[in-house]
Image (cartoon, helix red, strand yellow):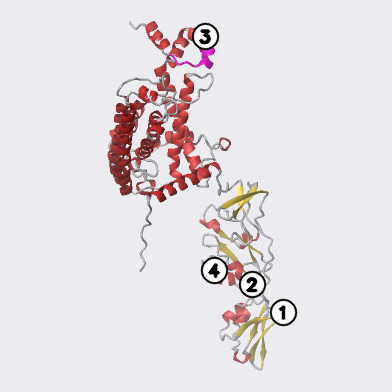
Amino acid sequence: MIDINAIISTMMNNQVNIPLLQPLIEPLLGMPVIGYLIALILWKPFFVLILIPGFATMGIMLLILPWIERKMVARMQWRVGPREISPRTRGIVQLLADTLRFLFQEVIIHKDAHKLYFLQFPFLYFIPVLLPLLFINAGTAGNPLVPIQTDYALQIMVALISLMPVFILGVGWASNNRFAFIGTVREAFLYFAYEIPFIVIVLAMIVLYGTSNTVGVVNAQSGVWWGIIQNPLAALTFFIAMVMATARLPFDIPEADQEVSFGPFVEYSGIAFGLAYVMGYEKMYVLSAMMTMLFLGGGSGPEILGLGDLSCGIWFVLKTLIVLVIMVNLRGVYPRYRLDQGLRIGWGAMLILALVALGWSIVVMGVRL
Amino acid sequence: MKKVATPEYDIKDKLKYHVSALSTAAKEVVLPLNITTHYPRERKKMPDCFRGYILFDPERCISCFECSFVCPANAIWMKEAPSGRYYPTLDYGKCIFCHFCVDTCPGGALKQTKIHDVAYKDMDEMFTLTEEMIEPPEIIREDEGYVEYEIDKEDLSLKRTKGIDKLIVDVAPSQGVPMVSLCVEPESCLGCGICEGMCESGAVSSLKEDGMVRMKIDMDKCTGCGLCVKECSMQILRLVRK
């Protein structure tokens, strides 16, 4: 027999504190069913994982980020960007319209494709994308907002993020198309080029903070001593590795539209293509959240009056959004690197920078001790 | 032979260029220039000499066939009107909008307009008859303004003006140089009468003198179309200034 009161009391002991909404929440908690629901929603792990900065925020980001990207890159290139759908809101519903179109389009699975894997992988990709969100700490020093606390959080996150390209390789293999093969091989090449500097950088930050628990990571960045100030080289290399990992310009070598026409996803159509299209954005969101947590002090920032814990979440999402916007706008600035140039950057400059950053962390740690 | 090598940059140059590229992008995000014309709602202002849809004025046409001869795409065919005169028809499926016909027309019967967005249902409809060339096609105007591109010292910018741009320009048609046909060697004339048959304005007449046929060209009636000059089997006719 499940003791519902025990569950509720567990939830009630770990509630998100929002002083502004407290008068509204108090009477609702007294009601029979709605009270349980409110208690669940305001339960810290649930709130962080599902609402801010978890799945709901990610969903909203997926809807507005392509619009922001298209609008800003258009401004850089003296164009207008999406406009014809709802001109008064400057075309903000463009992606919603695209999604609707994708939904009603036929999903074509060609004869040579491996049907099972072809349809599975875009859905399975959500596993390595969504699981790292379990360890994201959106709180500040001394006030963690994290669904699961564990001493191996960063390691698990890196492992899950390293798993993502495997799904893209699977997609390319199941497509059974020459462009998909070329894109997949390019992805595999780049995977090794960025993964090693990426892991070295995370290692450098673990050394610097002395812990791999995400709560400890944010606690180590109290005040203005954000990770980016403690170790700017690591932040720069992490950012480049992030751009490479999400295959954004100037490193969109696997997906290069003009060369291999979206690489591994060339055979996708309909809603399957829609899923494949947002795959990159999901990965971008997770990596940006990780960067915010590792280098930009998590949810720290001047507290917005009366919002309590929600203020941390808002700061966290804002920082993540800034990172994302900088990342997507590189598209309007840089041309695409060739594969060999990309590999040279990965195995050359980035690896050296990562190792220097690791040395920096060790020196800083030594001085501190 | 001069070989072009890849430029060598040191790390300082590279950083400088990265910063320059990123700052330019940031500047454009905040204060963007814009060169997009929202076409149905506004139009780009074309110059008066724009080579667009061609209008035809039958009053000025002297049926000289020059437009048809000069057309590089062979888009102009002369068609016989009920009056017996020949007028041009234009196939817009072939026309390359070089406007050689407009420039060549000695009487200024063809006229350029700024209309550049005519839609046809099929290829047959693109064959425009003489009657259809007289009046401009029906245009539904949705535009409330027009734009002009201006080149500043370094950048291109867009100037938007309210109001409707007039698509049919009021330019005086070219008067041309009045020419007449003249027989330079009457003694060589065979009297074959081809020129008389060619002439559409009835300026050439034949009369018998001493058992020989002599051609006579009425200078007042001659429009200077030059058809008789082209067709004369002895090539003794010339176009001269009136």
- Residue A353 in the image, given as x and y percentages of width and height: 33, 40
- Residue B232 in the image, given as x and y percentages of width and height: 58, 83
**Residue marked by disc 2:** B106
For marks 4 and 1 on the same chain, the one whose residue lies earlier in the sequence: 4
Q: Quadrant of the C terminus of chain A?
A: top left
The kind of residue on which mark 1 rests is Asp
CB contact under 8 Å: marks 2 and 4: no
Q: How many marks?
A: 4
The kind of residue on which mark 4 rests is Cys
Is any part of residue A85 visible from this angle?
A: yes
Spatial CA span between label 3 and label 4: 86 Å
Spatial CA span between label 3 and label 1: 106 Å
**Residue marked by disc 4:** B71
Q: Nearer the viewer, mark 1 or mark 2?
A: 2
The kind of residue on which mark 2 rests is Pro
Q: Chain of mark 3?
A: A
The kind of residue on which mark 3 rests is Pro
> In the displayed image of the protein, which residue is found farthest to the right?
B220
Q: Quadrant of the N terminus of chain A?
A: top left
Which residue does the image show at 39% across and 23% down from the upper left?
A219
On screen, residue A195 above or below A18: below
Which residue does the image show at 63% across and 67% down from the upper left?
B81
Element assignment for label 2: loop
| Residues behind callouts 3 and 1 on a single chain | no
A339 part of magenta stretch? no
**Residue marked by disc 1:** B220
| Residues behind callouts 3 and 4 on a single chain | no
Q: Nearer the viewer, mark 2 or mark 3?
A: 3
For marks 1 and 2 on the same chain, the one whose residue lies earlier in the sequence: 2
Q: Which residues are magenta?
A: A15-28
- Residue B217 in the image, given as x and y percentages of width and height: 67, 83
